Image (tube, rainbow, N blue to C red):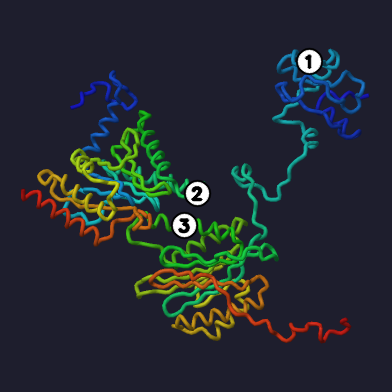
Amino acid sequence: MSSIGTGYDLSVTTFSPDGRVFQVEYATKAVDNSGTVVGIKCKDGIVLGVEKLVTSKMMLEGSNRRIHSVHRHSGLAVAGLAADGRQIVSRTKSEAASYEKVYGEAISVKELADRVASYVHLCTLYWWLRPFGCGVILGGYDRDGPQLYMIEPSGVSYKYFGAALGKGRQAAKTEIEKLKLSELTCREGIVEVAKIIYGVHDEAKDKAFELELSWICDESNRQHQKVPNELLEQAKAAAQAALEEMDAD
Amino acid sequence: MAIADTPSAARRCSSSTGWRPGAIWPYLDGTGPSQGRVLCSRAGSPSSSGVVRPSPAHILGSDRCGFASGGVAGAAEAQNDIDVLNPPPEVEKLNHKKELLVQPSSSMDVNCQRSLTMYPCVTGTSVIAFKYKDGVIMACDTGASYGSTLRYKSVERIKAVGKHSLIGASGEFSDFQEILRYLDELTLSDHMWDDGNSLGPKEIHSYLTRVMYNRRNKFDPLWNSLVLGGVKKGPKGDEKYLGMVNMIGTHFEENYVATGFGNHLAIPILRAEWHEDITFEEAVKLVEKCLLVLLYRDRSSINKFQIAKITTEGPTIHPPYSLKAYWGFSHFENPAQGAVGSW
């Protein structure tokens, strides 16, 4: 458990004696308490999946989207405080649009990740702003192929083969490492991501959840879109079957 | 002999003897180009000690004035108190004033040079379109003229907008490209919402009307005549839509439209031969008839056409092709035959 930063954790502009900014670390805790978000880079594209915890039976299916398109070729999956996530998504959309307005071509995924990271980091520099309580996984497909970036509340952004955020991230990361991503197509990747999310979902603590899957691959014309319904159902069925198999042992 | 030792004094001199080049006024703090160097002399004082540089001695102290002789400097100081912020009227009158025909209404206008569209440069000619059984058919040639020269011969003047519409444009081609960019932004934000909604032809026509009319009101029009056609599911089933907007914002909806020369040559044909629920094959024949007339009679059209159609399945823009044209008109064969006095 991290130490309680008594006195050094009141403001994001205060360092602790051992060189940590506690407010940013507390922001990361907000991310760790949310539903699992998984992203993998397959050989022909990206698959993003979210374990969307359903808090009320009254909620309409398909509402409260956690995966957003930020441009034709990229999508953002959000973990953590949903309202903070909306702000990041909105900013990313406008960064992508303004780049295209100035340079006449679509923003590269690397550039977009840089901009998101700068924006998230910005809010860790001033005492009158609080850090974003959400981490995002940005997946995109541009001239350099499919790319996956993860941006944390501290503003760090790294490029990944596979990334996970939220409650089940440790278990999810272990599962992702078992996959041979360089040989996986997106069609197979969808099933794998579904299996991972169903696997890390804690039946005891959280009752219902909705699986949100999206992809950007050659099959989707390199455009970010929700996985088509038949494939989604197939993936869910396969994941359920795998879960039952595990339980049966 | 008047010694021109201050800017205002020099101006008074120059009105009688003519402005001599080389007079470089110092800046108010005494700095300025060629300070301390000898320049050519001012009007009326060729024999004075080089150039008298009247520095604002009263502001910074007389050590700035490098080479002025004492006496001259003394005289200079007295006449050097030009209040730049509130200049005396005689000084103001002598200054050149930039005359603006249209007074700028905001600070933005003063800062950024706004040029108003006076004339188009690269233009496309007619577009014709009409509703048919399954949707809307639109056609035009693929040429763009630079004045009277047919400069570009493979220009696509019909484009798809989203899933439900086609836009065709005549007039300034660069303005059409800008309009396409605006529409691209619209459709992108549709795509990102991803809630099953998409802009239909009626909405896009309305948007374009607003854009064109507002630009016209700023005396900076987008120099186009636009044709907007499409099909979208509405409360009464699949609804076909066809409309037109021009550069002054005039807009209307009709069963058949044409821009430019098409208005004069194609519309009469369409009035006579268009009917509701015309089939695709008949529609193509009708379109080709109109295009052929335009080819013969419009000097800025070329024999390379594109036909596009939009149905519930989506937009289709067919590749360009040519029509068989008949130039074997008897009078073309020996044009000078009946001419009197020909040799």
| Image quadrant assignment for residue A149 | top left
> Tag 1's secondary structure?
loop
Judging from the image, mark 2 belongs to the subunit labelled A
| Image quadrant assignment for residue B174 | bottom right
User: Is the residue B318 above or below the residue B63 in the image?
Assistant: below
> Tag 3's secondary structure?
helix
Q: Look at mark 3 in the image and give the residue it sits on.
A: B184
Identify the disc placed on residue B66: 1
Seen from the viewer's position, the closer of residues B53 and A5 is A5
- At 30% from the left and 21% from the top, the residue drawn is A19
Q: Estimate the x, y position of residue B94 in percent, counting from the top left.
A: 80, 36
Q: Residues within 10 Å of mark 2 (few under 14, many from 20)?
A: some
Q: Look at mark 2 in the image and give the residue it sits on.
A: A101
Q: Estimate the x, y position of residue A221 in percent, counting from the top left.
A: 38, 58
Q: Amino acid at mark 2?
A: Lys
Instruction: For marks 2 and 3, give the CA distance.
Output: 11 Å
Q: Say if mark 3 contacts mark 1, CB within 8 Å.
A: no
Instruction: For marks 3 and 1, give the CA distance.
Output: 65 Å
> Tag 2's secondary structure?
helix
Q: Amino acid at mark 3?
A: Asp
Q: Is residue A192 visible?
A: yes
Judging from the image, mark 3 belongs to the subunit labelled B
Q: Is residue B216 visible?
A: no
Q: Is residue A45 left or right of residue B42?
A: left
